[in-house]
Amino acid sequence: MLGKTAGGLYWMFRFLERAENTARLIEAGFRMALTRSSDASSEWQSVLQTAGVRKYYDANHEDYDAASVVNFLLRDPKNPSAVLTITKQARDNARLVRTALTTEVWTAVNDNWMTMTDLLKRPVREVDLPDVLATIRQQSALVRGAMYGTMLRNDIYDFSRLGTHIERADNTARILDVKYYTLLPASASVGGRLDNKQWETILRSVSAHRSFGWLDEGDMTATSVTQFLILDLRLPRSLAFSVGQIVENLNYLADEYGDERESHRMARALYGELKGRDIADIFDQGLHEFLTDFISRNNALGGQIERDYRFVG
Amino acid sequence: MEKPDMFDEMLGADGVRHPYSAYHNWFEAQDAGRLAKKHKEAEAFFRRTGITFNVYGQSEAQERLIPFDLVPRIMSNREWTKLAKGIEQRVTALNAFLHDIYNRQEILRAGRIPKELISRNEAFLPQMMGMTPPGGVFTHIVGTDIVRTGEDEFFVLEDNARTPSGVSYMLENRETMLQMFPELFSKIKVQAVSNYPQALRQSLSACAPKTCDGKPNVAVLTPGIYNSAYYEHSFLADQMGAHLVEGHDLRVVDGHIAMRTTRGYKRVDVIYRRVDDEYLDPLTFNPSSMLGVPGIMDVYRAGNVTIANAPGTGVADDKAIYSYMPDIIEFYTGEKAILKNVETYRCSEPDSLQYVLDNLADLVVKEVHGSGGYGMLVGPAASKKEIAAFREKLKKKPSAYIAQPTLSLSTVPIFVKKGLAPRHVDLRPFALVSPQGVNITPGGLTRVALKAGSLVVNSSQGGGTKDTWVLED
């Protein structure tokens, strides 16, 4: 496979994942702002921070009101990660690797782009927001379904999945890091509904609110939420799950290509930080320190994959 | 349908012409509303599949659809066989001509065409002198533009020996028709076109360099996703099972061209390039080109890679050369040309120039190096002011122009609100050339001027396309 094609697949799925995550973040933020109007502004600030686009926002805005933030995240050309922008980038990458995709996957990505272009032509009004967010998630489910149902399980699939999971791990880690102070056990002693709301937002941002309720025997505590999002292998958006998938897909590549590269070593080391780890241990290390370290290592792993498989010349 | 005033391929002087009789019967039995719905469906299908072309010079890279008309253009096998013979003769002569021009130049020595036509030809590449490309083929893929004016009157309008495009529309149009009207194809036996990608691959593989052992690695070289024909590039690569590469995916490794893969560099034997000559090699041609491969011309000259079509084939696309095609065909094949040329006045010749200036209102004047329907004057359709302006341009640089009489192009009906309406068409069949022979897919791309009375069929100027049927027997 061409290195460029591997890179195109990887980035196409990173962008698709990012668009979906942004929709979730907005949804969680919106719910939070609705229920705690007094603190809406700080909630929107942390949404922008989690999305990693706060500096672009601050350069052009002074207030953190729902309409401005939501439209910035969805469709502002000044935001390099706006859903509209990255949906187009995902589609551009799909065009680039068109020969590596099945017709079903290509059509799903192209449909996604056409739908988004139409949906986000004008500023989104608050009443339309739930529909818009639902559509974004539905569209990415369609791409995923087409992918799962029609693509050969070979290196094409592996590079796509690597893009998805590098992006996903990054996203979950950022969500936790932006809110880490509310998750410190010390803050749990404050207790009360306020903190529960914060945890709930975090869970909603990764679509894990209901699953948490299903799986957890105990209460919603800082420790249990953190444990769930970082270490639980059953949650498809936890760090451990995402990195586990990265290791798995890299192993498939090693089988197919007959060799291991530096990225294999790095991925296994990163997985070693998570597998069988005790959450108390992570709190001892310092949650913020742990997450910062994770984000940078995950990033470095992504960069190493790009070099190992010659995405660019 | 309203009565056409020129030769209409469906509705002849004595009623429906034979090749269209079965289709016409079917059409008469159709509900107009259902057809209108089908028409919309076709458009949605093209958009979803991404069969679009980009339009340059607009603020955002816009993607547009080429309008598709659901009434097929139909030819009998007898009509087609004659056309195909003529095309085969023509592309064979073109290849012999190109080889001669870049080697012994016998045709110039024999005085059959003026030397200046080559020496002053912008598409002529001195770097190709002395070259015999692998397989001996210069132009591997040729699109011959043909118009019709009567029952037996076919003319070649131009030869596209450089990089003819549009073949993906030929294939997708058929695919769309099959999806929309499967019942038609069980009633009417139409020769298939779907074999084109395999034929292209075989034809290209047969021209692989001698140094290639085993199955040749074929790649399609595209300028990238923002190129207006990118869809076609990816479509052909996909259908052929070839790699779709850009310049930065390739480099010279140990005297060969190699592509960067996830497992290292891998040799490429045949490059079907959709990048213009000028951008092919920054070391040989345009030094600022980012689209090409530095050093590819050296590898090519050493015979270690096949470039299709060969650099420098654009010489033959020149409209002044075109005017000599009957001589060229006779010179290399010893036969009279089967397909007629349109009578052409070379404005470089004083007598012709005078005639053209005196008759501008009746003529079509084209730039010698022009393409895409730009920079031309269609006398009968132009205003007095436009004609006057063109007259000045023409006087300034007569050698840059040729003129032709306005042909009364045949019409084929298109589907409109009121039913059928005649519109002018042309035809671009695609010929593949390899040492094994010439392979011409039955049919080709029919382009149609969608505006009533218009003679300009180019997609950049409001033209559409039709599926083209050649009937079995």
Image: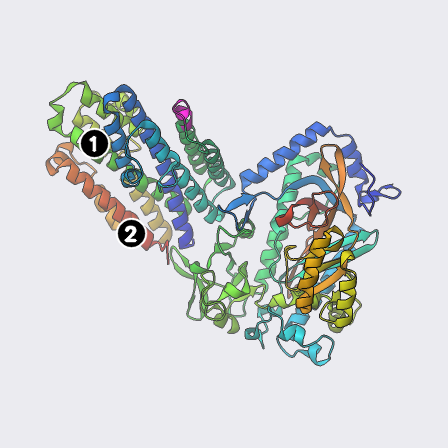
Measured along the vertical axis of the image, is residue A195 above or below residue B402? above
Q: Position of residue B237 (x, y in %)?
A: 53, 52
Of residues B428 and A305, the one drawn nearer to the viewer in this rendering: B428
Badge 1 amino acid? Lys
Q: Residues within 10 Å of mark 1 (few under 14, many from 20)?
A: some
Of residues B316 and B99, the one drawn nearer to the viewer in this rendering: B316
Disc assigned to residue A304: 2
Q: Give the chain letter at badge 2.
A: A
| Distance from the alpha carbon under mark 1 to that under mark 2 | 29 Å
SS for callout 1? loop
Colour scheme shown? rainbow
The boundaries of the magenta stretch are A125-132
Residue named by callout 1? A179
Quadrant housing the N terminus of chain B? top right
Contact flag, marks 1 and 2 (Cβ < 8 Å): no
Badge 2 amino acid? Gln
